[in-house]
Image (cartoon, grey):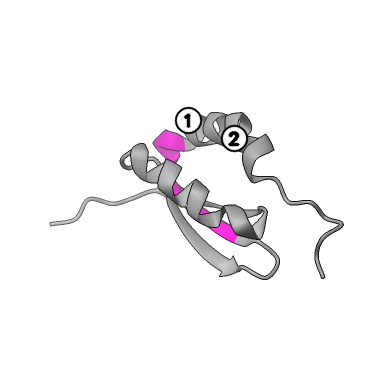
Amino acid sequence: MCKNFNSEELYLRISPGRFHYLKNLLEGYDGLAILSSVDMKYGLVRLKFSLENRKAVLAFLESEAVNIKQNIYNLD
């Protein structure tokens, strides 16, 4: 039987070429968050994570921000 899963979703815009980088990093943190693409042309992604992991997810994103950032001037 499945436990109730209180989750949160966070939508981000990352550099489109960094999706697999971020996905691979998250796989190393088993159960931290699930990454899904929304619109890869613009680098839109969704992170889904448990409320318990919120603080850890935000800390992780802050530490990786420079590696996954979207340059808004390259949206063509």
In the rendered image of this protein, does residue 27 appear above or below residue 76? Answer: above
- Screen quadrant of the C terminus: bottom right
Query: Between residues 52 and 64, which one lies in front from this camera angle?
Result: 64
Q: Residue at x 49, y 55 (%)?
A: 20
Secondary structure found at label 1: helix
Residue on which the image places disc 2: 64
Disc ID at residue 41: none
- Relative height, residue 24 to residue 37 (above, below): above
Look at the magenta stretch and give its main secondary structure. Answer: strand
Q: Secondary structure at mark 2?
A: helix
What's the magenta region?
45-53
At which x and y percent is residue 70?
A: 73, 51
Three-letter amino acid code of the residue under disc 2: Glu
| Label 1 to label 2: alpha-carbon separation | 12 Å
Residue 76 can be seen in this image: yes
Can residue 33 be seen in this snapshot? no
* 57 with respect to 44 (left or right): left
Mark 1, Cα crowd under 10 Å, few <14 / some 14-19 / many 20+, is some
- Label 1: which residue? 56
Rendered image quadrant of residue 63: top right
Going 59% across and 35% down the picture, which residue do you hit? 64
Mark toward the start of the polypeptide (1 vs 2) = 1
Q: Position of residue 68 (x, y in %)?
A: 63, 45
Instruction: Indicate whether residue 49 is drawn in magenta.
Output: yes
Q: Residue at x 51, y 47 (%)?
A: 22
Q: Are marks 1 and 2 in contact (CB under 8 Å)?
A: no
Q: Could you tell whether 33 is left or right of 65 in the image? A: left
Is 7 inside the magenta-drawn segment?
Answer: no
Q: Residue at x 42, y 47 (%)?
A: 24
Residue 31 sits in which quadrant? top left
